[in-house]
């Protein structure tokens, strides 16, 4: 019960029940002693975690407790990558700016192979880190989760990190002295009956260590692990992955 200008109003019972459910101490009922005016009724204040009460609705804003972990995945089928090369970017830029285009140069398989790789400033073979989030979110949607919720439930990579290093099956970096990608030669369709030869990098035995930060209120550690395992099995990353009617770029979660 509350009092306003000497008149007594009845609080919605649902509001008291919702506040009690959030762990707040139950509100003391207004007490009217004989001979005491209604203005002196004893009513306790709402709990601090109740941010706002409007028309009987309680808004509860929880504290963020993000957890950081590392998800390790290992390829179960070869990984094919195809980064945008310098020549492709130049041709696209010239076309958008309506600049004169040069005659198409003779294809150089080795150059095309090297330009298909994602290389960071240290010269390491990498993948776009966001590819793993997109892959995991798609797997969650397949399982029946909401895409908008999954996008907010976890984040991959370190802040400002665009690329993540590709390791071999033993967890060692790819390098000229150790494991290194091989050059694929594939015939692809690029238009109405038009075929072209593509030269791309392929990693036969590969693994990746993915830094992940997640909100345990939205997704548990076990669910996160299952999400990435499902993502590698049925969605994949890179060219000709299962999501694109292929069987490349598949992986499984490494446990332990």
Image (cartoon, rainbow, N blue to C red):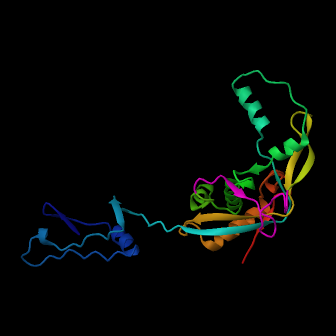
> Hey, which quadrant is residue 52 in on the image?
bottom left
Q: Is residue 93 visible?
A: yes
In the picture, which quadrant includes the C terminus? bottom right
Residue at horizontal 81%, vertical 61%? 250
Residue 9, position as x, y percentages in the image: 22, 64
Decide which of 205, 63 is in the foreground and name it. 205
On screen, residue 111 versus residue 216, left or right, reads: right
Judging depth in this view, the residue of 7 and 69 nearest the camera is: 69
Q: Residue furthest left?
A: 35
Residue 127 lies, with reference to residue 222, above or below; the image says above
Q: Which residue is drawn at 87% across and 61% down?
A: 204
Q: In screen coordinates, is 175 left or right of 18? A: right
Quadrant of the image containing the N terminus: bottom left
In this picture, is 121 found above or below 233? above
**Quadrant of the image occupied by residue 193:** top right
Q: Relative to residue 97, is residue 189 depicted above or below?
A: below
Residue 96 located within the stretch drawn in magenta: no
Along the line of sight, which residue is nearer the eye, 225 or 53? 225
Of 239 and 89, the residue lying toward us: 89
Q: Give the range drawn in magenta.
A: 159-180
Task: Name the magenta segment's main secondary structure.
Answer: loop
Residue occupying the far front of the picture? 177
**Image location (x, y in percent) of residue 184:** 91, 50
Quarter of the view holding residue 7: bottom left
């Amino acid at each position: 019960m509350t009092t306003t200008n000497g008149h007594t109003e009845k609080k919605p019972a649902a509001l008291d029940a919702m506040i009690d459910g959030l762990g707040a101490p139950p509100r003391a009922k207004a007490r009217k002693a004989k001979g005491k005016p209604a203005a002196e009724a004893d009513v306790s204040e709402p709990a601090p975690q109740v941010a706002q009460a409007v028309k009987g609705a309680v808004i509860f804003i929880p504290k963020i407790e993000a957890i950081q972990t590392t998800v390790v995945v290992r390829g179960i089928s070869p990984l094919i990558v195809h980064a945008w090369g310098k020549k492709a970017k130049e041709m696209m830029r010239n076309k958008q700016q309506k600049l004169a285009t040069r005659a198409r140069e003779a294809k150089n398989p080795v150059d095309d192979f090297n330009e298909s790789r994602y290389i960071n400033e240290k010269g390491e073979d990498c993948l776009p880190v966001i590819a793993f989030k997109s892959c995991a979110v798609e797997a969650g949607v397949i399982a029946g989760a909401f895409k908008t919720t999954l996008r907010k439930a976890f984040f991959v990579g370190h802040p400002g990190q665009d690329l993540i290093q590709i390791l071999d099956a033993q967890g060692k970096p790819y390098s000229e002295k150790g494991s290194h990608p091989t050059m694929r030669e594939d015939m692809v369709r690029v238009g109405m009956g038009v075929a072209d030869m593509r030269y791309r990098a392929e990693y036969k035995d590969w693994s990746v260590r993915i830094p992940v930060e997640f909100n345990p209120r939205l997704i548990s550690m076990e669910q996160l692990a299952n999400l990435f395992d499902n993502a590698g099995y049925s969605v994949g990353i890179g060219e000709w992955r299962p999501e694109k009617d292929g069987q490349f770029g598949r992986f499984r979660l490494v446990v332990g």
